[in-house]
Amino acid sequence: MANLKVGDVAPNFTANNQNGETVSLSDFKRKNIILYFYPKDNTPGCNAEACSFRDNYQLFTNKGFEVIGVSTDDEKSHKKFEAKFDLPFTLIADTEKTVVEAYGVWVEKSMYGKTYMGTARKTFVIDGDGKINLIIEKVDTKNASQQLMDLLK
């Protein structure tokens, strides 16, 4: 498992988005990226986080950022998620778990005394040169975009 830190080069990836198009991190060279990982489409915390980024999407794009969400859900699930919440940004369908593993967010979790593997909620800010500028380990789902804006000041 990767243990990425600020200053590291962000791992490149290639995966499909919600429209079945192939997307690579390298497609966004010279752009600042907000790469956020979330556990599952259409769950309360993930809905809140996605809507937080949606509601402030224009603010982020005006500041030169692209927003990309990543979960292990498939393209069809992402397409429904996008439509249900009118999400204006790319959602990566990491069904093979290569992106979550490269970023070290595929972790052991526990619920009700049972352990299982799942995606840790984490946000990475990547600059135009592909370096990680910021990592948010404890994401405030309802206020994810405000939390990020406060840290970017």
Image: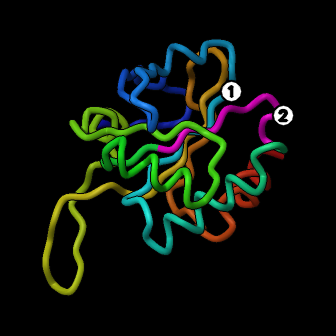
Residue 18, position in %: x, y?
44, 38
First-in-chain label (1 vs 2): 1
Residue 124, position in %: x, y?
55, 41
Amino acid type of disc 1? Asn
- Residue situated in front as seen by the camera: 54 or 28: 54
Amino acid type of disc 2? Lys
Q: Is residue 137 magenta?
A: no
Q: Which residue is mark 1?
A: 32
The quarter of the displayed image where residue 74 is located = top left
Q: How is the image coloured?
A: rainbow
Q: Residue at x 33, y 34 (%)?
A: 99
In this view, the residue farthest toward the bottom is 112
Mark 1 to mark 2 CA distance (whole Å): 9 Å
Residue 151, position in %: x, y?
74, 51
Q: Are marks 1 and 2 in contact (CB under 8 Å)?
A: yes
Decide if residue 3 is in sight here.
no
Pointer 2 local density, CA inside 10 Å: few below 14, some 14–19, many at least 20: few
Q: Which residue is mark 2?
A: 63
Numbered range of the magenta stretch: 60-69
Which structural element holds mark 2?
A: loop
Decide if residue 25 is in sight here.
yes
Q: Is residue 10 above or below residue 140?
A: above
Q: Is residue 153 above or below residue 63?
A: below
Q: Is residue 82 above or below residue 32?
A: below
Q: Can you say which quadrant of the picture contains the N terminus? A: top left
Q: Is residue 67 magenta?
A: yes
